[in-house]
Amino acid sequence: MNARIEIDFPFAIDPRGRTATTDEADHVRDMIEQLLFTRPGERVNRPDFGAGVMHQVFAFASPEAATALEFTTRAALQRYLGDVIEVQKLDVTAIDASLQVEIHYVIRATGERPVQTFVVGGPA
């Protein structure tokens, strides 16, 4: 069996002085977080990578905007992580000056069904 080593995000050094690693489920969660919080154009060699959630924190004011953000976020998840996860449900909610993105998904390799909530913005 060829075991994969998943580097933890954000990058850290473990107590042994080595690169910190993580399990499959946490690695998938890390990849989702990176996709959501990367702005398109931020990565030089992949300028189209990202979901653009960060751009929407203060622009989010209507049900139409919520629907549009859910659509674009789902499309980004499918495009970049569709071989790793299957999105079951995606909800975007505005709470004051923050956005909450809740994702229900299946990890294709394990069949695990996590639910993750990511929040951007809010009080400083």
Image (cartoon, rainbow, N blue to C red):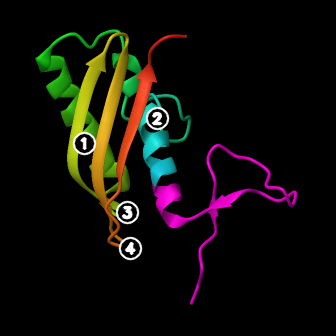
Question: As drawn, which residue projects farthest toward the left?
Answer: 64
Name the residue beneath numbered marker 4.
110
Real-space Cα separation, disc 2 to disc 4, in angstroms? 31 Å
Residue drawn where x is 87% and y is 57% of the image: 17
Q: Which mark is residue 74?
A: 1
Q: Secondary structure at mark 3?
A: loop
x, y percentage for residue 74? 24, 42
Q: Kindly identify which residue carries mark 2.
A: 47
Q: Nearer the viewer, residue 118 or 35?
A: 118
Q: Which residue is mark 3?
A: 84
Please name the amino acid that badge 1 sits on.
Arg
Name the residue at 18% across, 18% down: 65
Of badges 3 and 4, nearer the viewer stands 4
Q: Badge 1, how many Cα within 10 Å: few under 14, some, many 20+?
A: some
Spatial separation of the CA atoms under disc 2 and disc 3? 21 Å
**How far apart are labels 3 and 4 at the CA level?**
10 Å
Left or right: 91 as drawn, with respect to 10:
left
Frontmost of labels 1 and 2 is 1
Span highlighted in magenta in the image: 1-28
Q: Between residues 111 and 31, which one lies in front from this camera angle?
A: 111
10 Å crowding of disc 3: few (<14), some (14-19), many (20+):
some
**If you read the primary sequence from the N terminus, does the residue marked by circle 1 or circle 2 appear first?**
2
Q: Report if residue 50 lies within the magenta region.
A: no
* Disc 2 packing (10 Å; few <14; some 14–19; many ≥20): few
